[in-house]
Image (cartoon, helix red, strand yellow):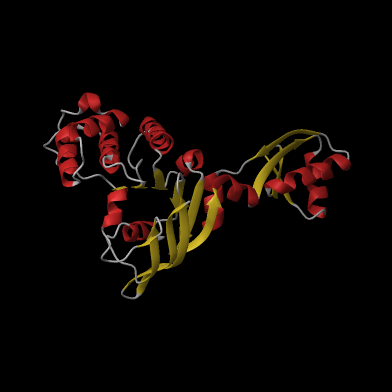
């Protein structure tokens, strides 16, 4: 089921067009990676979805409902953490969430606040003032606020920004729990590409406001060309033979490095074996970072 549908979305600021005919869809249950270089239009797009700015053209539908400048009801089904969370730093985590719970007219506020504090592992520090929190704790409190009203969708813009490796790992674990245990769909914008690669099932890559790729993370990476390192008994001879066969092949650190897509690996291997070469090892070197750089180059 499509939870969010964006069609031919445009946004201009005077003479600058930040988003250009952008179309994509987010399915219920997705962890949807939203990727692009700085200035690609990611934050602008997310702000349009949240009604913080209005499109210059195109349409946004949430659960089939067309979103207009007058629409507000749909926001009760969406949570968001855009950039750094903002709280009353002289109040405690519990006091901050209590204010948001009242503003959102949440029933059984006390129970719900305790639930989300346990989910983000801040229940033991709920009565500490936010100004005493680390950046990771503030990020987790921001997510607690985003899921407080039990939304269908949460939008996380750089949730691991400024976190150390352990904090990043904790954030990945939390996002996976939100998706799997709470059945909340997640749109995740991040510059930490390994994070997207580990937890997202679908992704969108944009550059200069335009869509470059959309689809399943593994499927997109497998369909595009990658570097494959082959350990063989006569690598230099093998490189010459593959070059003559139309492959891109070169020597690299004792390995034969070949450029091909995942579907082409069996045929490349067969070519080497038929020619009498021994193969000891084959390694795929594609990471999401390599794929991203290749696509956005």
Residue 228, image x, y percentages = 68, 43
Please say whether residue 82 is visible from this viewpoint: no
Q: Nearer the viewer, residue 113 or 263?
A: 113
Q: Does 257 sit left or right of 140 as displayed? A: right
Name above or below for residue 176 compared with residue 55.
above
Horizontal arrangement in the rendering, residue 7 relative to residue 92 (left or right): right
Q: In this orientation, does residue 274 appear?
A: yes
Residue placed farthest to the left in the image?
90
Task: Give how far across and how far down residue 38 sits, in percent.
Answer: 39, 56
Q: Is residue 18 depicted above or below 259 in this figure?
A: below
**Closer to the camera, 155 or 280?**
155
At 18% from the left and 44% from the top, the residue drawn is: 105
Q: Name the residue located 81 percent from the left edge and 43 percent from the top edge.
A: 238
Residue 296 at what x, y percent from top left? 52, 58
Q: Quadrant of residue 68?
A: bottom left
Q: Residue furthest bottom?
A: 15
Which residue is drawn at the image coordinates 82% and 42% (left, top)?
270
- Near-viewer residue (97 or 205): 97
């Amino acid at each position: 089921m499509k939870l969010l549908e964006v069609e031919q979305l445009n946004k201009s600021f005077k003479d600058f067009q930040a988003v250009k005919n952008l179309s994509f869809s987010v399915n219920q249950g997705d962890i949807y990676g939203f990727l692009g270089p700085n200035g690609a239009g990611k934050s602008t797009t997310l702000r349009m979805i949240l009604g913080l700015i209005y499109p210059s053209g195109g349409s946004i539908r949430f659960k089939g409902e067309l979103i207009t400048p007058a629409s507000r009801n749909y926001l009760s089904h969406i949570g968001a953490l855009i950039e750094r969370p903002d709280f009353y730093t002289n109040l405690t985590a519990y006091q901050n969430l209590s204010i948001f719970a009242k503003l959102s007219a949440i029933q059984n506020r006390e129970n719900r606040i305790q639930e989300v504090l346990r989910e983000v592992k801040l229940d033991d520090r709920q009565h500490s003032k936010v100004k005493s929190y680390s950046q990771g704790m503030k990020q987790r409190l921001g997510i607690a606020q985003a899921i407080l009203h039990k939304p269908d969708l949460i939008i996380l813009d750089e949730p691991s920004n400024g976190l150390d490796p352990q904090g990043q790992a904790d954030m990945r674990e939390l996002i996976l729990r939100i998706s799997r245990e709470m059945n909340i769909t997640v749109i995740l914008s991040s510059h930490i590409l390994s994070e997207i690669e580990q937890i997202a099932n679908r992704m969108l890559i944009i550059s200069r406001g335009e869509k470059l790729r959309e689809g399943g993370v593994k499927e997109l990476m497998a369909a595009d060309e990658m570097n494959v390192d082959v350990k063989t008994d006569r690598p230099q001879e093998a490189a010459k033979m593959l070059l003559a066969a139309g492959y891109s092949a070169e020597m690299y650190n004792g390995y034969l490095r070949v450029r091909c897509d995942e579907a082409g690996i069996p045929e490349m291997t067969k070519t080497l074996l038929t020619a009498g070469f021994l193969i000891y090892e084959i390694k795929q070197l594609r990471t999401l970072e390599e794929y991203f750089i290749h696509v956005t180059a």
